[in-house]
Image: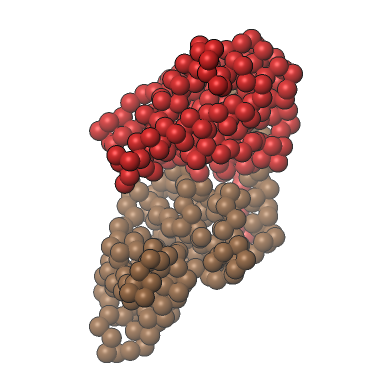
Chain colours: A red, B brown
């Protein structure tokens, strides 16, 4: 499994992903699931991936190849709108999944992949899209400012509570790390390193990309502060009426 | 859906359940999923239920009928060990599910039900069992002190963090309410009233059963304190190194 989330704020974008892949408990590997594409300076295009690793690698390689191919019908460096890129990537993904369908009809759900596409092109608004295995997609919105793929449920309550479009990039980034930590603690198939990308609106050239291995000092400090704070908070919660 | 959890502590048992059933978004009802059986004074037997409502009602009625039937092979008031009761209930449940199998083979997963059985008999240890749809079951243990059924993932991180067998009944009960609140916030199919049962070890005659409707003062106070506390905690979390 995998856990990735994208938060679309007024102030910009926050993306987080884990790096564990598992094709069984005896086949665990580390792969980055955050792909920032090298394209024209007017745009930021980042893809988070979950699902079948062969499918997600096929998609990413095809996307990279198309950038360097002036004859390709679509390419990240030429497409004018982010939602067109979502459609283009969804199409490659759906095709990659079905191309193995005839030889492995039984296992086709196993081929599935989901993506989150996030970024900004020129003066257009920054956006984030969740691309489903069938290739269709939805956008984040002010009333639904975060998107998740993979093992999404454990990390959802803290995002539900803390995220609205007005929060700061840094606060949302801390929330994403805590959401990731919840998924990692509750599900062994989600694991470090955690990658984080923080991109201010209209200034994606200032985007920060961070990578937190297990034991990285900031992540450790954040986790400890969170755990200690929760313990203190628990002690202060209102007592039942029969308690002293 | 449904969410129920049981926590087995050194100090006793804490059980919590929601009360929403849904057979579709236009068919939402309120049913208690916490069943405390009226049996002999030497024992406490409580069943939490999730899954198909027809199946869970069939099981509970059969169990109640068997208590009043001296010819029944098993009955809650005569069975000597709690794990035997788990096997007995698992058997009724599995049979109730398959009895509709021939006429509705396609929909048999829809018939599934899971249960948590918790209680204490005489001087035996207090225990909790998760009964799977097939009728097999596992016990809570010191290393796995809580069990969950239904929509379990949203409420798991807080239990993972806060529960070990040494915590007090009241602290565990607050944790169960917060776990329930997380499930209710993140999933519309989990809803009030919340029921809570707190039973001290070896004194189950002192068990407390509480019911929290939406807007109940203690629940409201607890939620507000939790939300305010999380907000305060978030403000105090360690800053990234580039922040002022």
Quadrant in the picture for residue B113 = bottom left
Locate the N terminus of chain A by quadrant. Answer: top left
Q: In x, y percent, where is residue B53?
A: 47, 71
- Residue at the outermost front position: A71
The answer to whether residue B120 is seen in the rendering is yes
Q: Nearer the viewer, residue A107 or A242?
A: A107
The answer to whether residue B158 is seen in the rendering is no
Quadrant in the picture for residue A55 = top left
Residue visible at 64% across and 51% down in the picture? B222
Residue visible at 41% across and 46% down in the picture? B164
- Does B77 sit above or below residue A219? below
- Does B211 sit above or below residue B167? below
Q: In x, y percent, where is residue A211?
A: 49, 18
A202 displayed left or right of B115: right
Q: Nearer the viewer, residue B44 or A79?
A: A79
Quadrant in the picture for residue B228 = top right
Q: In x, y percent, where is residue B116?
A: 39, 63
A103 displayed left or right of B197: left
Residue visible at 38% across and 72% down in the picture? B104
- Does B136 sit above or below residue A32? below
Q: In x, y percent, where is residue B64?
A: 40, 82
Q: Nearer the viewer, residue A23 or A231?
A: A23
Residue visible at 74% across and 31% down in the picture? A166
């Amino acid at each position: 499994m995998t856990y990735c989330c994208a938060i679309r704020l007024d102030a910009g974008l926050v993306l987080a992903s884990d790096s564990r892949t598992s094709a069984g408990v005896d086949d665990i590997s580390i792969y980055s699931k955050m792909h920032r594409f090298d394209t024209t300076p007017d745009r930021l295009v980042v893809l988070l991936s979950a699902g079948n690793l062969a499918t997600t690698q096929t998609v990413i390689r095809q996307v990279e190849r198309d950038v360097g191919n002036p004859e390709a019908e679509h390419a990240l460096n030429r497409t004018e709108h982010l939602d067109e890129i979502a459609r283009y990537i969804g199409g490659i993904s759906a095709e990659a999944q079905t191309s193995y369908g005839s030889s492995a009809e039984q296992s086709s759900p196993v081929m599935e992949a989901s993506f989150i596409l996030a970024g900004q092109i020129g003066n257009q608004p920054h956006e984030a899209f969740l691309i489903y295995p069938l290739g269709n997609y939805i956008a984040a919105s002010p009333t639904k400012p975060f998107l998740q793929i993979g093992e999404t449920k454990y990390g959802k309550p803290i995002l539900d509570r803390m995220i609205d479009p007005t929060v700061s990039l840094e606060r949302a980034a801390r929330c994403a790390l805590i959401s990731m930590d919840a998924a990692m603690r509750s599900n062994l198939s989600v694991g470090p390193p955690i990658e984080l990308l923080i991109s201010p609106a209209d200034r994606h050239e200032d985007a920060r990309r961070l990578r937190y291995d297990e034991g990285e000092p900031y992540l450790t400090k954040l986790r400890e502060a969170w755990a200690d704070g929760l313990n203190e908070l628990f002690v202060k919660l209102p007592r039942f009426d029969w308690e002293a």
